[in-house]
Structure formats: C-alpha cells, structure tokens
Amino acid sequence: MTSLYDVTRDELAELLVGEPKYRLDQVWQGLYQRLELPHEMSSIPKALRTRIDHELPLALKQELRRVSDGGDTVKYLWRLHDDNPIETVLMLYSDRVTVCVSSQAGCAMACGFCATGQAGFNRQLTVGEIVEQVVRASREATAIGRRLANVVFMGMGEPLANEGAVWTAVERMHGDLGLSARHLTISTIGIVPGIRQLTTRPLPVNLAVSLHAANDELRNTLVPINKRYPLASLMSACAEYLDIKGRRISFEWALIHGVNDRDSDADELAALCRRFSLAAHVNLIPLNPTPGWPTIGSSATRVRQFRDLLEIRGVNATVRRNRGSDIDAACGQLAAGQPVAVLRKSQVTTRDTSGSTH
Ligand code: SAH
C-alpha cells in the first residue's frame, strides 16, 4: 500500500496529471513545509483534496497517545495498515524538540534487555511510515508553538537493518522537511556493513552505537549480533566513519547492575575510546526495566561514579536524562502493546489529533 508520505514528488506529479502545473508545488509544500494533510489544503479544490485523501491515505492510525513528564513526553502507539503496531516518542525540552522514531515493526536483534528485542521482528517499515512519524510529531509540536528539529532513530527496530528505507527517509527529512542533517541521529546495535554503507552516504548525520560492553565475551551475551560483528570490526567501522565524515560518534551504554557497571568495565570502555580521542562521547543511562529481563539498572549513585571513572580516564561521558519510563516510553521499553504498567486515566487519550481520514 502506498501511503501519503511514501510517494515521491514524481509519483505525486503522475497523480496530478491534468491539473495545472503549480498544483504539484502546492501539494508538496503543503505536505512538507506546512505539514498540512490533503483535506486541510485550503488552496486546492475540494474534489482534488478528497481524491488525494482517498488515493494516498495516511500510514499511521493512532491507537493510543500517552503523556508523561507533565506533558513533555508523548508516546504514540500507531497501527499500520496490516495491523502491525509501532511506537514514536516526542520529547519537549526547554531548548529543543526531539522525536524518537521506529525503523522496523519489531526487531530481529534479540538483545535480551530490550523490550522490542524480546518481542521479535515483524517487518521493515517503509519510507512513508518512517517520515510520517516525524510529520505527525512535528504537527503536535507546531500546535503548541514549538519547532521539532531533532530526529533520533532510537525507537523500535534496527535502522541499519533497514538502511535503504531509513536513508531515503533521512533525505526526505533533510531535503523536504528542512531538518539539518546534523540534527538527525542514527543509532545502531553495530551492523558493520550498515555503518560502512552509511559512511558512503553524503549527509553528515550523527552515528550512535549501542555498545553496552567493551569486551566480546560480555557483549556476546548482551548483544547477540556481536558474534557476527565483533568489537574489533565494529570499532574499525566506527573509526572509518569518523575519518571520512568527521562527525563525533556516541557510544550508548545502558548500565546494568553488577553486569557492565564495574570499575573494570569503565577501564575497558576507556581503553576502547582512546583511539577516538575526543571524538567519542559516551552516553550513560541506567537500564530501564522490561518484562523479560531479570537484572536491574545501576543506582543513580553508581551511574555518576561510572561517569566519573570515565572522565578521570579522559573520556567524555554524559548521563542521559531518562524520559517517559512511567509510560514505557523510555529507551528499550517500546514493545507496542506488550503489557504495560497500570496507568492513571488522565494520562491516556485515544483522541486522534491528526484529523486522519482513517
Ligand atoms: N537498534 C538500535 C536502535 C534502538 S535505540 C540500537 O540498538 O541502537 C534504543 C537504545 O536503547 C539503544 O541504545 C539500546 O541499546 C537502548 N536500550 C535497549 N533496551 C534498554 C533498556 N532496557 N534500558 C535502557 N536502554 C535500553
């Protein structure tokens, strides 16, 4: 099924054959600059609006919208046309607005500590399904006078296992939605061929690598794909990315109590970062609870200590603020419909603010 944000400009032109030439610009700019849905495009004839609405439906049907952090974190649960569920998280900060998008329905990487990995893989998302997540979140930001400028591919799925669609979506976000490539971050579990492919791409997007362990023995147990792409090859691919793109690399590290938060883990991580000097940045986050993983996250004190251990060893490290854990919207908690914590009624709304024609 082709959805509204799947069509290319050329495909839209075909749909508009017989219309005055300027219509194409009107509709395209409506979709990507004014973030209007066809039925809201007051400058085009009503019959045409209805036809576009009908022939190019939205891909995301809002099933649930949950808010936390006093309204600053919003999690959407969408249903796709084939009933697959995916999630998107909008985060409003005082100085920026970020959306966390999914790149696959489910995930095949099977990291035991991640709720998406526990649930398994359903299918790849299309370009339109990815871009529309940004558009829908952006519309909500705009409605309250904010501008969404940052996209992180840190929702459900492994973006570099769907690199083709992800890259086309990135080009659409950059070229048509007008987002700066420097504000787009692709997070990977460490798919080496995907990183190499990304290295050949022209736009300077940010690369984040979910590391979690700095020796193969431990990483094999936490991140099964490490057996296929061990640390040595992963680090070479990162070094090459840095060399060619000149962009800083982030290493994500979910701190798991007694598993990867020991002094020796900080030592190993610092050693691994050394070759990147100041171009590597470690993002620390205590592991968020998920239904299928018994081990708990490190305490706040230990998280700070671990950061200090890294800093003393000359590594840039930040403790990441954890958003939306009470609505299962935090890192690793996106399972789209798996059992979630009991929620106060006031936090839930199923109202669809998009004006979708579904
Ligand atoms: N597959 C990609 C994109 C998902 S990003 C990747 O792995 O990078 C989701 C981020 O949250 C990753 O850094 C992931 O390792 C991390 N994460 C997964 N489960 C988590 C959990 N339970 N607590 C904290 N972070 C988690």
Image (cartoon, rainbow, N blue to C red):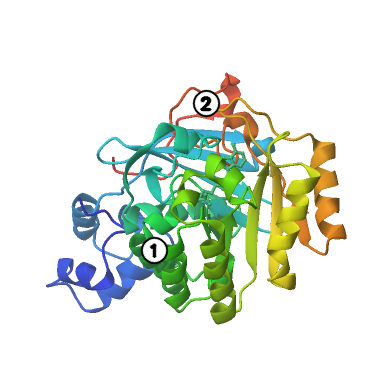
- Spot occupied by residue 7 in the image (x, y as percentages of width and height): 26, 63
- Residue at (64%, 29%) from the top-left corner? 326
Callout 1 secondary element: helix
| Residue nearest the observer in this picture, 209 or 347 | 209
In the rendered structure, which disc, 2 or 1, sits on the residue that comes first in sequence? 1
Q: Residue at x 26, y 41 (%)?
A: 81
Residue type for callout 1: Ala
Residue 292 is labelled as: 2
Which residue does the numbered mark 1 point to in the structure image?
169
Under circle 2, the secondary element is: loop
Residue type at mark 2? Gly
**Residue sitting nearer the eye, 315 or 353:** 315
Instruction: Please identify the quarter of the rendering in which residue 84 is found.
Output: top left
Q: Are marks 2 and 1 in contact (CB under 8 Å)?
A: no
Residue 235 visible: yes
Judge left or right: residue 234 versus residue 105. Answer: right
Q: Residue sitting at 60 percent across and 52 percent down?
A: 211
Which x, y percent locates residue 267?
77, 54
Q: Quadrant of residue 298?
A: top right
* Quadrant assignment for ligand 1: top right
Q: Residues within 10 Å of mark 2 (few under 14, many from 20)?
A: few
Neighbours of disc 1 within 10 Å: few (<14), some (14-19), many (20+): many
Q: Nearer the viewer, mark 2 or mark 1?
A: 2
Residue 141 vertical placement versus 67 (above, below): below
Q: From this view, report whether residue 94 is shown above or below residue 273.
A: above
Q: Quadrant of residue 258?
A: top right
